[in-house]
């Protein structure tokens, strides 16, 4: 099982710090942003301590395939209301692929985008066009994993059919994949309790081999709420047993699973959540305990 969580990538140790943080949680996978998730300011690659991070990974049998990178939220390739913003997203995505390649990671998770009330088909066409330009010019082997979305506002990608439409339009099919997010699937109206059925549908629509990453989150809202508010494992509407069944599903054994659950007060809950998952035992007092640290 490859299980980890979102870890920071910040001064002074950057990627070397990210790996040490993941290891301190007992994780053997992780996800980073190349800088702040909500802006596009980025440090020079030379500052990121890449070599030191790789050495630490090797020493701990932490494969680069299990270090996932997430693109910043502000990339919106579907913005046809302000095409200059979609163009900005395209340029940033191109530079982000270069950074991911330099880091040595293989998968970049990307939110497909929002059509900003311009219509779903126009938005999807815009995503396809920009992805094709980026991938035509890019020489790395980094795979862009389109994330399933909760469907709030005009978000594209809240159904497997929409992801399939993007996938169908992209020329470099070897360079696109999918990242499933359990909270987003639930909020979009999928029954994640029957995960095998969902995987069947995914396999039929896109193909299981295109699954690159799974975000493991509980949800603060019931199925179909279209909200996207993550909850700690076992404390939301999805529930502990369902999440355990997903994490331990044999068909997705090799896929990195990443927790993006909220901090409890000032405290990251990942070490404790990973422990609960490994022991398959829910601690209903976990949040209380973390709040009092
Ligand atoms: Fe995401
Ligand atoms: Fe996610
Ligand atoms: Zn989310």
Image (cartoon, rainbow, N blue to C red):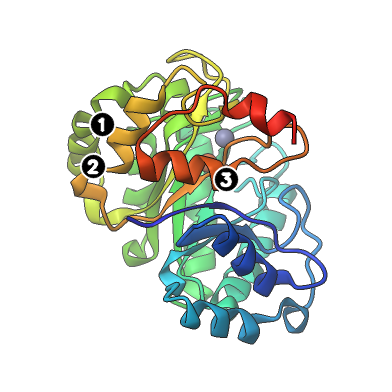
Front in this rendered view, residue 38 or 95: 38
Dot 2: element: loop
Position in image of residue 27 (x %, y %): 49, 57
The quarter of the picture where the N terminus appears is bottom left
Q: CA distance from mark 1 to mark 2?
A: 8 Å
Front in this rendered view, residue 90 or 148: 148
Front in this rendered view, residue 285 or 249: 285
Badge 2 local density, few (<14 within 10 Å), some, or many (20+)?
some
In primary-sequence order, the first of circles 3 and 1 is 1
**Residue beneath label 3, please?**
270
At 46% from the left edge and 25% from the top edge, which residue is drawn? 234
In primary-sequence order, the first of circles 2 and 3 is 2
At 71% from the left edge and 63% from the top edge, which residue is drawn? 9
Dot 1: element: helix
For residue 248, which quarter of the picture?
Answer: top left
Q: CA distance from mark 3 to mark 1?
A: 23 Å
**Label 3 CB-ligand 2 distance < 8 A:** no
Direction from residue 138 to residue 195 in the image, left or right: left
The reply to whether residue 118 is in sight is no
**Residue beneath label 1, please?**
195
Position in image of residue 92 (x %, y %): 68, 62
The reply to whether residue 91 is in sight is yes
**Residue beneath label 2, please?**
249
């Amino acid at each position: 099982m490859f299980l980890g969580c979102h870890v920071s990538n910040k001064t002074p140790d950057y990627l070397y710090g990210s790996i040490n943080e993941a290891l301190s949680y007992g994780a053997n996978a992780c996800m980073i942003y190349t800088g702040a998730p909500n802006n596009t300011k980025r440090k020079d690659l030379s500052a990121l301590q890449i070599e030191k991070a790789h050495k630490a990974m090797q020493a701990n049998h932490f494969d680069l395939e299990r270090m996932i990178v997430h693109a910043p939220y502000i990339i919106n390739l579907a913005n046809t209301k302000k095409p200059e913003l979609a163009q900005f997203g395209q340029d940033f995505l191109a530079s982000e692929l270069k950074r991911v390649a330099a880091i040595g990671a293989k998968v970049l998770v990307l939110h497909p985008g929002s059509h900003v009330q311009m219509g779903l088909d126009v938005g999807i066409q815009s995503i396809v066009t920009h992805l094709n330009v980026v991938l035509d010019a890019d020489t790395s082997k980094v795979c862009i994993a389109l994330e399933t979305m909760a469907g709030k506002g005009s978000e594209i990608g809240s159904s497997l059919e929409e992801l399939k439409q993007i996938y169908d339009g992209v020329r470099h099919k070897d360079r696109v994949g999918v990242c499933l997010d359990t909270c987003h699937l639930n909020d979009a109206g999928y029954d994640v309790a029957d995960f095998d059925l969902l995987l069947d549908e995914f396999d039929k629509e896109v193909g299981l081999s295109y699954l690159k990453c799974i975000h493991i989150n509980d949800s603060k809202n019931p199925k179909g709420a279209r909200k996207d508010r993550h909850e700690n494992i076992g404390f939301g509407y999805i529930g502990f047993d369902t999440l355990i069944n997903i994490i331990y599903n044999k068909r997705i054994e090799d896929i990195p699973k990443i927790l993006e659950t909220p901090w409890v007060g000032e405290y990251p809950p990942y070490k404790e959540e990973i422990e609960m998952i490994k022991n398959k035992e829910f601690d209903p007092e976990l949040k209380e305990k973390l709040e009092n640290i």
